[in-house]
Structure formats: C-alpha cells, structure tokens
Image (cartoon, rainbow, N blue to C red):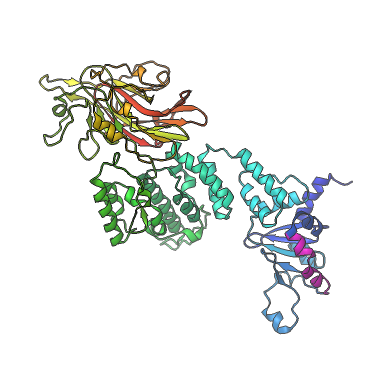
Amino acid sequence: MFKALDERIEEEIISGAVSDVFFGVGPKEEAHFFSSRANLAMASPVFHAMFFGPQWHREAGRQSPRKQRWDHDCNQTSSAPSSPRSRAAAPADPWGHCSPRTYVTERLQFRRGQHHYVAVSDIEPSAFKCMLRYVHHLDPLLSLDNAMQVYRAADKYQIFGLLDACGVFLDKHVDPSNVTQVLRLFDVACRLGQERWSQSFLRILEQLSRVQTRQVLQAQEFLELHSVSLATLLGSDGLCVNEERLWGAIRSWAEVRVMYKEQSEPEATGAGVDQRPTAVAASELVPSWQDAVRPFRHLIRFPAMSASFFAKEVSKSGVLSHQEVVDIFGFLAHKASKDPLTDDAEGEADVQVGGVYRTDSRIPRLGWCMAPGQSDPMLSEEFGLTEGRELMTTVGSVVVDGRGLSAFSWGSSVILAGPGTGFHLAFGTRGFNSGRHAWTISWRPMDSLQPGLGRTRCSRGGAAGIARDVEGFSETRSVVERTTSSSVPLGRGSVPLPASMAAGVGTGTGTEEPSARFLDWPSCIVFGVKRDVVTEGRYVAWEEDLSSTDAMKFSIVLDFPARTITYIADRGGRCWSAAMTHEGPVYPVIAASGPHFFSIEYGCHV
C-alpha cells in the first residue's frame, strides 16, 4: 500500500527511484539529491532553459552512454567526446569508470541512462534541499539558520514564489532587538552578496549601535564577521559608535584570526594539524593582527580619536605608515586648540586627513553645561586645583574635561558641587526628539576637605534622567547664549541646547528641587552612598569595594518610535522602563547633593 504522497516525495528527493535529474550539491558535490525535469522546469525558468532549451534537445538526440552534466552556472560541462584527443582533454568524469551496479549501490541510486547529473557547488546542501521541497509542493522548512541561503538559491534559479516566502519569513521572525541574531544574518547576507538584505540588516545594526553599543561590539558574532561584512559595517555612515571603542573591537576581531591561524598550524612537537572546524574561513587567517586590520584602515576615523588614545594605542601599532601617523597627529594638534563642543563643525564630514581619513565623529558629542549656583571662591582650593587653572566664578561647579576648566562647554566630565546643601543640576549639551538614542553616565561620589574646617564634605546622592526645555529663564550671560546657539550637526534626532536652558536659573542657592526639572522623576535613576535605601527598585548604591578612581555606570535609553524610556543599571543586571509622554525634545540631566564626579558618553555601555 502506498505511503502518503508527501512522504513518498520526501523519499524520492533522497533515493531518486523514479526521478531523472541527479544533483551533486556543495563545494565538493558531496550531497546528492534527485528531482524531475518537469517539476524543475515548471518552477524555474532557469531549469526550463537548462532541460528543454535547444541545446538540451541536440544533446538528448545523441546516443551517448555518458550522462549530461552542468555546472553551478547552468553551463554544460561534459558530454561524449568526439575524438580521442578531445576525450583525453575532457575533464575526468567521476562516474565514467563505474558500472551501473556501482551507481546503484555506492552512488545513491545514480542510473546511467535515467539520471542527468547537475553540479551545484555554490549553494549549501541544506538550502538546496529546502528549494527542492518547495519545487515539489512541500513545506520548504524555513528557519533563521537557512532562510538567507534558501533565498540565494531561489534567487539564482528565479523561483519567485520561494523568494517571496523567504522575505515574508525573515520580516516576521527577525527580532530587531536581538544583536546576535541580526549580526549573524547580516554576515550571511554580505557573504552571499545579497545587497537588499545586507542593507536591511545594516540599518537595524545602525539602530542597535545607538542603544546596545556594548553588546554589538562585544558579541561573538562580531568577532566572526567576514571581512566583507566588517568592511560594509565600517563604511556605514549610520554606525553610531565611539571610534576608540570601535578600534578595540576591530583589534579583537583581528586577534581572533591570529588565534585560529596558530591553532591550524602544526604543533612544534609534530603532533599534526588541528582539524577542528572554526567560524573563520581559512582565507581570513593571518599571522598578525596588524595584517588583518591594515586593509580596513581607511575606513577607521583615526582623526576622531583623542590625541592621547591615538598616541598610546594606534601610532606605534604598525597599522599606519609613518607619514599617516604624522598627518593624523598634525590634525589632532590643530583640533586640540578648538573647543570640541562649541566650535562650528559644519563641513567637518568633508575634511579628510591625507585625503583618506575622515575627521567627523560617528557619535553625537555630549557634554555637561549649566549647573545653577553662585560663585564659591573656596571651590578651587577645596578640590585641589592649582592656581594657574581658571575657575569661572559664575558657575557653582568644577569641570574637568582634560583641557582644564571651561566656562561654557564643560566637556564630557564634570565635578558637580557648589554652595548650599541642596541639589545642583547639570544638563546635557544636546537634546533628542526622534529616533533611538542612549547615553551612559559614569558616577563617582567625592569627599573633599572643607577649607578651614578640617573635615570632609560628604557626598550624598542624586538622580539622573531627562529634562525638557523650560522657557522663560532669565538670561544671565549673553555670551552663554551666543556659545550654545552654534549649530553642531550631531546626528539624526539631536537638537542643540536652547538658550533658555543654557542661561541657567538665577536662584544660585543650589536648593532647587530636582523634581521640578525632571520629566521622569517618578521613574528616573536615583543614586547615592547609602546602602539601606528602600525605593521602588530604582536606587543605585555605591559599591563599597570600589576604589576612589572607579566609577559606576548606568544608561538611559530613549525610544521615540515606541515612546518609552529605559534605565539600565547594575552592569545590565537591572533595567526598568516607563512611558515617555512629552512631545518636544528632551535632554540628559543630573542632580546631585554634595560633590560628585560625572562623565557622559553617547551609547549604551553598561
């Protein structure tokens, strides 16, 4: 009694009892499948031309004992040679010396005169089998592991129904928040040359680089990217990653290739070659990490790095030539004379050092500004500042940005303190009103000597969240307005700090309640040095075992399409979200009571 039709078709694809086409699939044609010319021709115009075109009829009319053979480009590669010389020059036929019995018993039922051999060396066997299932009206059994390979097979043979099925499957099942999944699919699409899907996954990675920066750069899938995939990623203008962190990730990627190279070489003891499979192609293995990085150096924006990082990590690495190092140092020296947050950067993207290296940053430049408070002549002495460093008396905060103290654009790092016992506030220099964005705040409490009192002013705590532009503040310094009005293009969805916020509030007492300035006060991050504080799970306590130079990190993630704000703390072990109802731009904000150190960086690095 016959089995069910679908069961018989599945068996036929493997056994070939009544089929007339034999496929050798894979790089060495090691996987074998069977099908029917009629089914293939009806499903694919490529197969129709292969089996029923004029060339096929000419060959079919010849009484040749040898089978017909086609390569993966659908070109006939062997037929009966017409002379001894041509027969000697013809490629060796792996089946020519075998008897019919051998075909049956050792060659998976290949039968001379029944089966026509087709070589398909450029498609994964599992994907080709899925395609044959579709041709024979079976479920192709798509999965995220094979969908891109099946798509490529369907694209090659112009099976448009299967192409649509793969597209619908990927759109439905790809999780745009899953870093490892998107990286893996992006890599496969780039390797296969599927530009439509590689660009689609690249756009997702661009968004993930904003809100899951650390996960993107440290994922195992990133280390296993093909060189073609890495070049596509580095060439993207939407990749939103700090160049110094990106350099570290690229170096780790290169070191993986060196590690696999060493593992594949014979041991010094003569034990032989390690044949364990690796995730890196043999053609990608290199003797040194510099050899792996050097082909991509023009895609790395070295001039966007800090001079100290470039000098320590890059200049002596051997990746760049001596002249390239000199050119980049010259640009960095010139850049150091300008304020990185207030100088107009219009046209910076068009500047190239040495005609090759782009100078514009991939990320928005975030810094702190406007901490309300009056002058405090004791702050300079209290924090151990030398006399030669200017302290602007109109600001009740001390700012450290690596270049000394600054009046207006304070830089990414700030010591927030001031007169009074209340809260002092600082705001981010840029706000956001669309897209997805994140920033990470590094926090460290500070204890400092009170001059003349012989005791310490102890840090207590504070909060971090978002604020809105509040109109109507008095403009205490016109120079602040002029400084903050310069427009620095920092990426999609970012807006400059309004003059009304930059001017500050005139209270000067440091006693303003932060709840009046926070949009997200009920859900924002609350931090402090006490460990026995019981709140709604949003309190971040300073860890006692950290040194005075360590800092705790927490991130805030804005998702305007979803209208949510997410807070991440405890090294990613704790996160919570809230609805974002404000329609206008929002700005990073911190409030602190007592002296604290803060540093802000675009992206999520927790």
Q: Is residue 119 above or below residue 531?
A: below
Q: Is residue 52 magenta?
A: yes
Q: Is residue 397 magenta?
A: no
Which is more toward the observer, 24 or 165?
165
Q: Position of residue 491 (x, y in %)?
A: 41, 40
In the image, what residue occupies the spot 37% across and 43% down?
242
Q: Position of residue 537 (x, y in %)?
A: 42, 20
Q: Position of residue 47 (x, y in %)?
A: 75, 60
Q: Is residue 210 above or below residue 19?
A: above
In the image, what residue occupies the spot 80% across and 61% down?
20
The answer to which quarter of the image holds residue 289 is bottom left
Query: Position of 114 compared to 23: left or right?
Result: right
Residue 437 visible in the snapshot: yes
Which is more toward the observer, 350 or 147?
350
Residue 99 visible in the snapshot: no
Query: Position of 122 compared to 19: left or right?
Result: left
Which is more toward the observer, 241 or 376?
376
Q: Position of residue 167 (x, y in %)?
A: 65, 45
